[in-house]
């Protein structure tokens, strides 16, 4: 009997050990990675020493489109904060899933593509002709825009080889087309292009290495109507994008010398930049006509309309689609 009792106690101990081991393994397997990062944040500052959101929690909530009120919440203890984080995360994830369902079943095209289509229709309706030029640009075309090895913009260019780069702007290609179109078509000549541009930018919420530009130009008009025409075209594009309040500001430009920037939103985001000619840059192309031209960043237009803080989620991405975080 004593021998059997000893075996029974040993078996019970083994069962308890196996249960505890299995429970520990499950906790390791199924614990959320966000909990790991939260604990790391707490270990750095001391558990409970800061009863606002941890940096990891803030980043996660921002990625899920938390509003300013949620981000500003304060808590009495770290435990209260972490429980609140789970609740808000679950709520925001549900909202993001609903948005993702709407993207699939209703829009079926990202906001960037929908905006592009509206802009094309609006400009074509005003007599502009859409053109399409290569994404690869030659060094010689950039040099005609005063961007050579000594230019402060040279370090921002993505070079493919000694003579070719990914286009940092659409203007050189439009110049190339205009020198022939001014000869072949009656004036004024109105053309535009929408396409990707590439520039090595400083990392930030308003910058990206790849972005989408709308460049439009009207060439061969009377000089005295240029300012009025610039205002009309600015209103056309901003109105099509859904932006009601904006203003024009004169700024210094490394390429054009002076530009007229279009600024919008409470954070004064530059959504476009305009210039007028005749201009010294016209000479290499043998262009002498008066003109107006504007370049708009489509992702920045969307930032202003949506109130989004990040340009990255508005553009081409593997992390977001239609501004919706996929890591949910």
Image: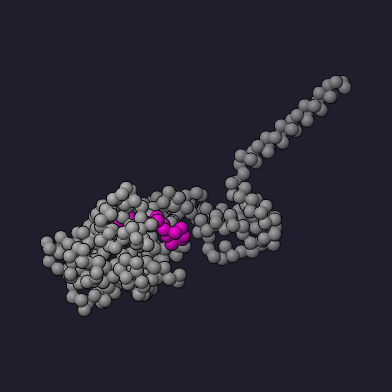
Q: What is the span of residues highlighted in magenta in the rendered image? A: 193-209
x 64%, y 50%: residue? 40
Residue sitting at 32 percent across and 66 percent down? 255
Say whether residue 55 is left or right of residue 170: right
Furthest residue toward right: 2
Q: Quadrant of the N terminus?
A: top right
Where is residue 114? Give x, y as percent. Answer: 33, 57
State which quadrant residue 89 falls in. bottom right
Is residue 107 in sight in this rendering?
no
Residue at (45, 50) in percent of width and height: 319
Relative to the observer, which residue lies in front, 316 or 140? Answer: 140
- The location of residue 124, given as percent across then percent down, is 22, 63
Please tell me whether residue 1 is drawn above or below residue 35 in the rendered image.
above
Where does residue 111 sit, x and y in percent of width and height? 37, 57
- Along the line of sight, which residue is nearer the eye, 231 or 142? 142
Relative to residue 158, is residue 4 drawn left or right?
right
Magenta-drawn stretch contains 320: no
The vertical placement of 170 against 245, above or below, is: above
Left or right of 226 in this view: 238: right
Q: Nearer the viewer, residue 87 or 58?
A: 58
């Amino acid at each position: 009997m004593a021998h059997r009792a000893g075996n029974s106690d040993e078996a019970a101990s083994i069962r308890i050990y196996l249960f505890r081991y299995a429970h520990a393994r499950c906790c390791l397997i199924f614990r959320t990675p966000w909990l790991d990062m939260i604990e790391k944040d707490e270990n750095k500052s001391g558990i409970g020493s800061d009863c606002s959101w941890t940096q990891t929690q803030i980043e996660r909530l921002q990625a899920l489109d938390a509003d300013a009120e949620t981000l500003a919440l304060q808590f009495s203890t770290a435990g209260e904060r972490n429980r609140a984080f789970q609740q808000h995360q679950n709520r925001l994830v549900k909202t993001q899933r609903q948005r993702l369902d709407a993207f699939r079943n209703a829009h079926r095209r990202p906001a960037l593509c929908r905006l592009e289509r509206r802009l094309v229709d609006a400009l074509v309706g005003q007599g502009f002709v859409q053109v399409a030029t290569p994404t690869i640009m030659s060094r010689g075309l950039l040099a005609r825009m005063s961007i050579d090895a000594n230019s402060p913009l040279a370090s921002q260019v993505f070079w493919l080889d000694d003579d070719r780069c990914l286009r940092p702007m659409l203007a050189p290609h439009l110049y190339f087309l205009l020198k022939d179109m001014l000869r072949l078509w009656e004036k004024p000549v109105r053309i535009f292009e929408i396409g990707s541009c590439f520039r090595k930018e400083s990392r930030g919420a308003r910058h990206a290495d790849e972005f989408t530009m709308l460049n439009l130009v009207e060439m061969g008009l009377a000089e005295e109507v240029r300012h009025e025409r610039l205002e009309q075209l600015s209103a056309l594009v901003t109105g099509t994008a859904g932006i009601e309040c904006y203003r024009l500001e004169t700024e210094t430009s490394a390429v054009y010398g002076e530009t007229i920037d279009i600024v919008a939103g409470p954070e004064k985001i530059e959504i476009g930049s305009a210039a007028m000619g005749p201009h010294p840059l016209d000479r290499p192309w043998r262009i002498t006509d008066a003109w107006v031209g504007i370049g708009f960043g489509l992702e920045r237009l969307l930032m202003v309309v949506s109130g989004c803080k990040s340009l990255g989620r508005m553009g081409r991405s593997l992390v977001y689609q239609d501004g919706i975080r996929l890591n949910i």
